Image (cartoon, helix red, strand yellow):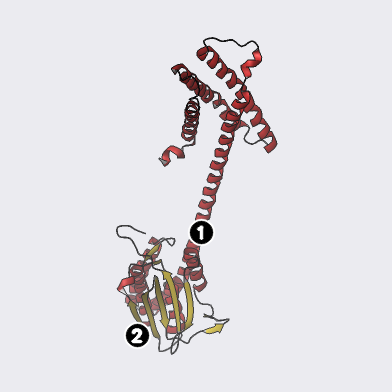
Amino acid sequence: MNKWFEDKERFFWILHTGGWAGFVLVYYLGSFLHDMRAVFVLVIVLNGIAGWLLTIPLRYLYRRIWDFQPLALIGSMLLASYLIALVWTVIKNLHYWEIYKFGYVPEDWIYYFTNSLASFYIIFSWSGLYFGIKYYQMLQAEKRNVLKASSMAHQAHLKMLRYQLNPHFLFNTLNAISTLILVKENDTANKMVSRLSDFLRYSLDKDPIKTVTLKQEVQVESLYLDIEKVRFDDRLTVHFAIDPEVENALVPSMLLQPLIENSIKYAIAASEQGGTIWISANAFGKDVLIEVADNGPGVNLDESSMYRSKGVGLPNIKERLQSLYGDNYSFDIAKNQPTGVKVRIRLPFQEKKRGKEN
């Protein structure tokens, strides 16, 4: 049904014909007080056909004067409606006199314009509906354009935020590969290149606008951590604790990577003994609670918010979450016990539907 009304040309003819058919029906129902001979019904139908034909030129006239100034536009509409109403009045009177009155001729020509005011009201109503519907269509089209532009800007913003996160990791990994090559650790370097290739392939394949399941996100972060384990060897320990209940929960793609990268940078790389990273996810009412914690040196406290100086990607994460969820999320950074940092993210529990790719 919507396809019928999406075509403006078809939509006009449907409304135009339906409106005059309605006029005939209303006139017929309101004429029960008259002599209801079949010939009177014929007069009503002929009047409707005449109105249908006479208002068609108005459509093309109104198209030409559409850009007139408001006063000129209203004046032109009134004049055109009145002239068409006069012609229609004459035709209606002729139908009535020639068909219903069997050739009655009035004494004076002025009688041909009898009831022209009533005809003017009907034609003017047609004109008003035409302009009203036309303006409504124009406003709806502008609204769709604004929404489309807003959506495109929103998507571009999200893509920009997501792709700002990857260069940090890429720079660190390439530096590590370069170092391995210099010290003749070719097998290890080859292993890192292979895993880096898999990681980047996933990163490029996944649209940052869309979401992935938490299970997929954990898998790609495991791949990322495998790369980092090549760099840090026994200095990096990782513990995953993902509740199976939330494995199909949808999360922004590459959400955890900058958090883990921060832990690598500040908890693992900064300590000769290395450290541990804990990644957990659980159901929390109607939400999903995700935590990334480490046992590094900790954080500074500034106006009740916890942050790491020059932390990678944290502002971007908040902006992505704000863009995707509005106010229906939380992002907190706190001290881990006994040492380190704990990042806690709460998101709406939106589960992937079976058989449908997100």
Residue type (three-letter) at the residue carrying disc 1: His
Seen from this angle, which residue lies furthest front? 33
When the figure is inspected, residue 210 is found, relative to residue 289, above or below; the finding is above
Q: At numbered mark 2, what does the secondary structure look like: helix, strand or loop?
A: helix
For the N terminus, give its image quadrant.
Answer: top left
Q: Is residue 209 above or below residue 296?
A: above
Q: Residue at x 34, y 78 (%)?
A: 240
**Corner quadrant of residue 65:** top right
Mark 2 neighbour class, 10 Å CA radius: few under 14, some 14 to 19, many 20 or more: few
| Residue 42, x across and y down, in percent | 46, 19
Residue 225 in sight from this viewpoint: yes
- In whole angstroms, how far apart are the C-alphas of marks 2 and 1? 42 Å
At 51% from the left and 14% from the top, the residue drawn is: 100
Residue flagged by tag 2: what amino acid is it? Answer: Asp
| Quadrant location, the C terminus | bottom left
Q: Earlier in the sequence, mark 2 or mark 1?
A: 1
Q: Position of residue 83 (x, y in %)?
A: 63, 24
The residue singled out by tag 1 in the image is 154
Q: Residue at label 2? A: 234
Q: Left or right: 227 with respect to 53?
A: left
Quarter of the image for residue 357 reads bottom left
Query: Taking 98 as reference, is 139 above or below it?
Result: below
Residue at x-position 36% and y-position 67%? 249
